[in-house]
Amino acid sequence: MSTMFPGVPDFAEKRDRLRDLASRHDLDALVLREPATLNWLLSARCHVPQTLESACLTVVLSPAAGELTVMTNAIEAPRLKDTELAGLAAHWQTVPWWADREEALPSGRLGADRPRPTELGLTAEIARIRRVLTGHQQLLLTDVAKDTAAAATDTAHRLAPGCSEREAAAELAHALLERGLDPVVLLVAADERIAMHRHPLPTDRVASGRMMLVACGRRHGLIASVTRLVSFGPLTGAEQRDYARLLEVERAFLDASVPGARLGAVFSAGVAAYTENGFPADEWHRHHQGGFSGTQPREFPAYGTSGEILTEGSVVAWNPSGGGWKVEDTSLVRSGGVRPLVHDDRWPTLRSGGRDRPGILVR
């Protein structure tokens, strides 16, 4: 059976990476359950609801023939065949909604990204495979990032003093959804809550002086992260300097994000930049600093001991914060250096490290 997938021109390339892995381990089949793996392979929404860390299907790959089996239930199968996986040549195993969709797993030697006790655990190896985006995925992510930035810009220009965090979040969700982006993360903070809470779930708090918008938008199984800050009035000189200092911290993360770098070394370079730019030495204790992204908002928070290696085509999202401000982007690791993607020409920019970086929108 051919497993060509119309509309996903790099499907065969991704499938063959997994086939090679399965063959190296002499597996009879590779079982894929991890939502990030399924999103990466199928370029589809594999979640119901959109944000849960579980998938509505399981994919089994036979390495010898490259054939796929999609295991799902009678609720999801018609929709998947009609929309998300329309045109995918695969065997379909559909069970009633009350049954275990994996009750007919093949026999033999199995490997998996979320392994059961009898299966070979390949979580880390599969993560390394999907961490390198194909050329087509890099183009798609560029568009996802551009549209996520545009959604934040549109929302920011609608804000005014007296707007509540929930109202701002609703505007941002609308702007993302109308661009075909799933809002998998949505955070908003008003005034002092920007400095107080690094994960500000929206409340009824009404803004008077400033507001922060944070979102992760997903499309084609790819995710872009953005943070934007709005001030309802001129910034003081001290506030401008504090934000510029934070951009210098971000610069350290970005400058160090090159192919061949150890993730922990990039993290350490960014952390050292806090004190180098006048922030308290423990400022980074207040929030994780980011890490690998692309198919998840963050695969895991980076630490100084993180041994994973950045490769060309991998994606990082760093989010330093301090001085009452935060900056966040999604960046593609390239041979000539990292390329930040979340940009909108309508947003004010500042130069830092030879790059255009987001400023603060003053209304």
Image: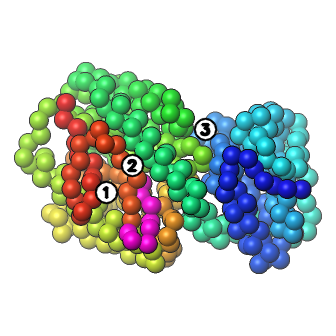
Work out whether 265 lies above or below 322.
Answer: below
Residue 249 visible in this rendered orientation of the protein: no
Residue nearer the viewer, 341 or 127: 341
Q: Which residue is mark 3?
A: 50
Q: Position of residue 181 (x, y in %)?
A: 53, 37
User: Nearer the N terminus, badge 3 or badge 1?
Assistant: 3
Check disc 3: other Cα within 10 Å, few if <14, some if 14-19, many if 20+. some
101 on left or right of 127: right
Work out whether 133 lies above or below 363.
Answer: below
Q: Which residues are magenta?
A: 330-337
**Residue located farthest toward the left when viewing the structure as drawn:** 237
Q: Is 260 part of what is drawn in magenta?
A: no
* CA distance separating discs 2 and 1: 15 Å
Of the two numbered discs 2 and 3 in the rendering, the one whose residue sits closer to the viewer: 2
Q: Which residue is mark 1?
A: 320
Q: Residue 24 is drawn in which quadrant? A: bottom right
* CA distance separating discs 2 and 3: 22 Å
> What residue sits 39% from the left and 65% below the top?
338
* CA distance separating discs 3 and 1: 27 Å
Work out whether 175 lies above or below 266.
Answer: above
104 on left or right of 284: right
User: Nearer the N terminus, badge 2 or badge 1?
Assistant: 1
The image quadrant where one finds the N terminus is bottom right
> What residue sits 65% from the left and 42% below the top?
45
Check disc 2: other Cα within 10 Å, few if <14, some if 14-19, many if 20+. many
Q: Residue 120 is drawn in which quadrant? A: bottom right
Q: Position of residue 242 (x, y in %)?
A: 15, 52
Q: Which residue is mark 2?
A: 342
**Contact (Cβ within 8 Å) of mark 2 with mark 1:** no
